[in-house]
Amino acid sequence: MDTRAFSPYPGTPAESRPVVPKGPRTLPRIKVLIVGNEPELVAIWARSLARAGCAITHVLSQDEAIAALQHRAYHVVILDLSLSPGSALAVADFAGYRWPDARVIPVTSSTFFSDGSVFQHIANACTSIGKDTPADDIAAIVEHYGTQR
């Protein structure tokens, strides 16, 4: 009787076989810019995305967002449409100009854009979500759109 363990890679040295990661699933290193002025809510999103392996930058205003976008490319921009001070649409415009491949995820607490018009105003919007969206769902959305490069 053969006592050797079954290998799906017969005749291949163990060190050249693919490594299957163990433990929790992690996202590829997706760079995410979160633009919002509700620190508690943004902290929840940031923790969930960081646990998933994303590189997070959080800013509180339009000026800070523009400065961040001038110096670094982001795969995904999570943008609170009720941004104050400043304009969330100006941030989305600049993101689309500076980094055309960046995906923008507008976040809203109102039904103002529920008709889909947000996609007419933000050219690189990939989806729109409510502020009450669970953090783990946001991480899944970021994974989906952030890996489409």
Image (spheres, grey):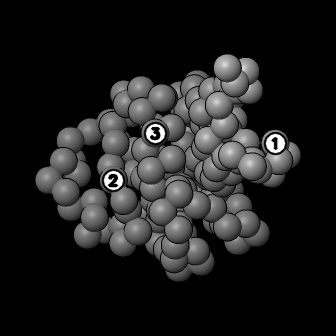
Relative horizontal placement of residue 94, taking residue 111 as reference (left or right) = right
Residue, disc 1: 14
Check disc 1 and report its element: helix, strand or loop. Answer: helix
Among the two numbered marks 1 and 2 on one chain, the one whose residue lies closer to the N terminus: 1
Which residue in the structure is indicated by mark 2? 127
Provide residue 129's location: percent of width, then percent of height: 34, 42
Task: Give residue 76's quadrant in the image.
Answer: bottom right
Alpha carbon of mark 3 to alpha carbon of mark 1: how far? 33 Å
Q: Nearer the viewer, mark 3 or mark 1?
A: 1
Q: Is residue 86 visible?
A: no
Q: Secondary structure at mark 2?
A: loop
Going 42% across and 26% down the picture, which residue do you hit? 134
Secondary-structure class at tag 3: helix
Q: Are marks 3 and 2 in contact (CB under 8 Å)?
A: no
How busy is the neighbourhood of tag 3: few (under 14 within 10 Å), some, or many (20 plus)? Answer: some
Which residue type does callout 2 highlight? Thr
Q: Horizontal and vertical percent for residue 57?
A: 69, 48
Q: Which residue in the protein does label 3 denote?
A: 140
Amino acid at dot 3 = Ala
Report whether 133 appears left or right of 143: left
Kind of residue at disc 1: Ala
* Residue 98 rendering spot, x and y as whole percentages: 59, 77
Q: Quadrant of the N terminus?
A: top right
Please tell me which of labels 3 and 1 falls first in the chain: 1
> Mark 3 or 2, which is nearer the eye?
3
